[in-house]
Amino acid sequence: MTPFRRLIDILSAFVLGAVLMPLIIWVTLILLIREGRPILYKAERMKTPDQGFLLWKFRTMRHDDADRGVSGGDKASRITKTGEMLRRKRLDELPQLFNLLRGDVSLVGPRPPLRRYVEMYPEIYGPVLQARPGITGLASVVFHKTEERLLAECSTAEETEEVYCRRCIPRKARLDLLYQPRRNICTDFRVMFATVFKNWEPH
């Protein structure tokens, strides 16, 4: 990551944090009243093929000690009503501004994967994680709804894992690698605007 891009990330974290603070407070209070503690969900994601970090989100699911892998239809019963609303508008990702400020992620880049998938597919994630992971990215804009649909149709953890590994990981990686050589400030802003537009359009 260049110093200029890091400076943009830091400034963006402060500006967005200030602008979105009323919304962050509102979500926090809603979760506290409706769902109780904990408000935040923290899970390891990978910054590089061998360096992990804790990614912060607002909690959208009931806790399960046996939880692993990505969310699919097999976990649908654990998503709370408030969590469903937050996920639909991607408001659960607001705490990632803290990760942005820390330098764990950039504004735009490949979504940071779980360690298990990086270890399972080093030939895929080695090239993908040459770029700093992002809060959003081309794969998030283009493939997010398709991924949700594919995983929502899964009824077991094993099926979710199989579909995610076979149908989601390779397609998202191709999009991330397609974006890397075209990445600049202008295209990053286009992806960010597309992210906001796609997630706030009427349903």
Image (spheres, rainbow, N blue to C red):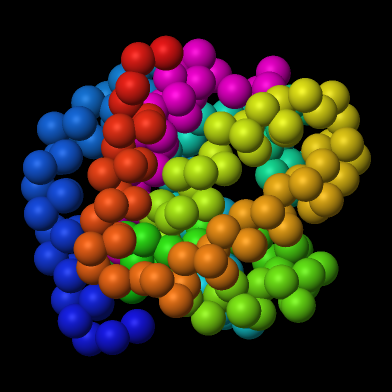
Q: How many labels does the image show?
A: 0
What's the residue at 76%, 77% (across, down)?
123
Left or right of 164 on screen, residue 175: left
Q: Is residue 39 visible?
A: no
Q: Quadrant of the C terminus?
A: top left
What's the residue at 32%, 26% (across, down)?
200
What's the residue at 73%, 42% (across, down)?
67
**Relative to 93, is 100 above or below?**
below
Q: Does the stretch in magenta take in 95? A: yes
Left or right of 142 on screen, residue 2: left
**Relative to 32, is 160 above or below?**
below
Q: Where is residue 77 in the image (x, y as percent from the top left)?
A: 69, 18
The secondary structure making up most of the magenta span is: helix
Residue sitting nearer the eye, 24 or 85: 85
Q: Quadrant of the N terminus?
A: bottom left
Left or right of 80 on screen, residue 190: left
**Relative to 44, is 68 above or below?**
above
Q: Where is residue 2 in the image (x, y as percent from the top left)?
A: 28, 86
Q: Which residue ends up furthest to the bottom in the rendered image?
A: 3
**Relative to 97, is 64 above or below?**
above
The answer to which quarter of the image holds residue 13 is bottom left
Q: Where is residue 33 in the image (x, y as percent from the top left)?
A: 35, 17
Left or right of 61 on screen, residue 201: left
Residue sitting nearer the eye, 12 or 202: 202
Q: Position of residue 59 (x, y in %)?
A: 48, 35
What's the residue at 57%, 43% (across, down)?
143
Q: Does the stretch in magenta take in 10? A: no
- The span picked out in magenta is 76-100
